[in-house]
Amino acid sequence: MYKFDYKRRKSCEVNIGGVRIGGSYPVAVQSMTNTSTMDTDASVAQCCEIAAAGASIVRLTAQGVREAVNIGVIRDNLRRKSVTVPLVADIHFNPKAAFAAAEVTDKVRINPGNFVDPGRTFKKLTYTDAEYAEELKRIDEVFGSFLDVCSLHGTAVRIGVNHGSLSDRIMSRYGDTPAGMVESAMEFLRVAQRRGFNDIVISIKASNVVVMVDTVRLLVATMAAEDMAFPLHLGVTEAGDGEDGRVKSAVGIGCLLSEGIGDTIRVSLSENPANEVPVANELIEYIALRSAEHGLDEMFGKLPDVSFNSDAVCGVGGDNPTVIVHPMELLLDNYIEVGSPEALLDAAFVDEIRKAPKKVVVLRPGNHVNVRGAVMAMAVKLRAEKINNPLIPRLTYCGNDGDKIAIHAAADFGSLLLGGITDGMWLDAPDMPRQWSMNLALSILQAARIRFSKTEFIACPGCGRTMFNLEQTLAAVKLAVGHLKDLKIGVMGCVVNGPGEMADADFGYVGAGVGRISLYKGRECVEKNIPQEEAIPRLIALIKKSGRWHDPLR
């Protein structure tokens, strides 16, 4: 049964340093500093900048105990400036740092892939049932003790699963799958549930938008089956910068928000962290408008389950690639337009469509602010009527604010594309140049992993662990290899998440130390600790050696 009206998932409330998320509270925005956590003045200044931009929560990395303790110093300095934004410690590999952070911060983020289990080696390991059970017992002991400390100090916890840092133990049972990511979170959530600790937020992130969306959907269903309703933090990790980073984030986060999933979000950009906040707020505000609109379920909520498979018509639908209706790719001159969901309540109009099986059906949401729900309702109605014509949503975005249009269009089309209901895109931006709207449509399709038209850059947003100037380095790598449209290139600031989060990249550029870079081919490190000034030429040489290079067109 489909539900078309917008409705937030019901989650429990969690208090993070006075900021409440979940329940009926608005979706909260987060960001993360990219300063050294030991640089108190720089970190305080950036926290102030992020808070002034509108973020509700700020995260800082804590590689070790001293960094964790210094977050408490940073918090004290902020309070003296009357800046009350809660601070979150980001922990990898170091439970001691997590225990220390729990005493001085508002929330501690731990990664279940490396909190108790050793770091991922990408090796297939075998565990007997007894060995597996013993590891779960260790998680109960270590994580349970950590929760005791958090409970004592009123500290919330984020269980943050990253696609690229699943433990070898999880990989041995589940592989590199959404099921494995969900189970990695559930092992820790079950410990918390048994101990009655409820101040928990969960995140499951991936650089692959499709994986991220599918996994979060599965997590929601799995938690519901085990009577859990913990709030969810959403984000597409390593999204990159510029329009690509914004579009990629809006496709993934916007899709889930449109489905009512998500209590707090972060848009991860390889830019000044404060730049993330207005993007996140724009996305939240756009989706939140839908909460006041109802009626689609009353009209269409009793429709049966359907398949969105379509028949092929003039190269559209069936097994054909997703098309873009645009003068630069495809013009539709003979189609049937459905101007609103209400139009399909007219049986004569539905019969007219049925009598034209060789026409593409163009779906317009009318005046519905719930774009996803309106188009979904039309698509389900047509399929329930056994009409298998190709379906293409036509969505219009007026104005000349490119960032706003990109965010809105990515959220709308992303939700429809990842819902599998559309055979194409018709993106109208009448106040923008034609080439711009075509490029935006291509960017959305690439973010949804449907069509690739340019180099895919998997780039982290940077944090206190980053070993180089991320913005400058990413720009330089783009300049050198950005013409290789069939490649995915990772640019990662450190080895903590780097090799894992760019695991599906063809080649990777990873900070190995101050002024030192390691190069990867797939998941294999092929050059270690080379001088940064040599890294890009040697990356080019590696791509050439692999037979994947071609010179840019002049």
Image (cartoon, helix red, strand yellow):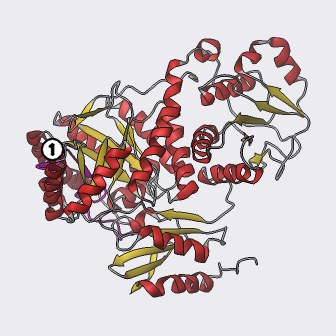
- Asked whether residue 365 is drawn in magenta, I would say no
Expressed as whole percent of the image width and height from the top left, the position of residue 287 reads: 52, 32
**Corner quadrant of residue 553:** bottom right
Expressed as whole percent of the image width and height from the top left, the position of residue 515 reads: 36, 82
Expressed as whole percent of the image width and height from the top left, the position of residue 424 reads: 74, 42
Q: Is residue 499 left or right of residue 413?
A: left
What kind of residue is marked 1?
Leu
Give neighbour class at mark 1: few <14, some 14-19, many 20+ (Cα, 10 Å). Answer: many
511 or 190, which is in the foreground? 511
Which residues lie in the magenta part? 101-124
User: Is 344 above or below relative to 393?
Assistant: above
122 or 273, which is in the foreground? 273
Examine the residues drawn in magenta and state their main secondary structure: loop
Residue that mark 1 sits on:
147
Residue shown at 70% from the left, 80% from the top: 550
Residue shown at 39% from the left, 55% from the top: 273
Which residue reaches farthest left? 152
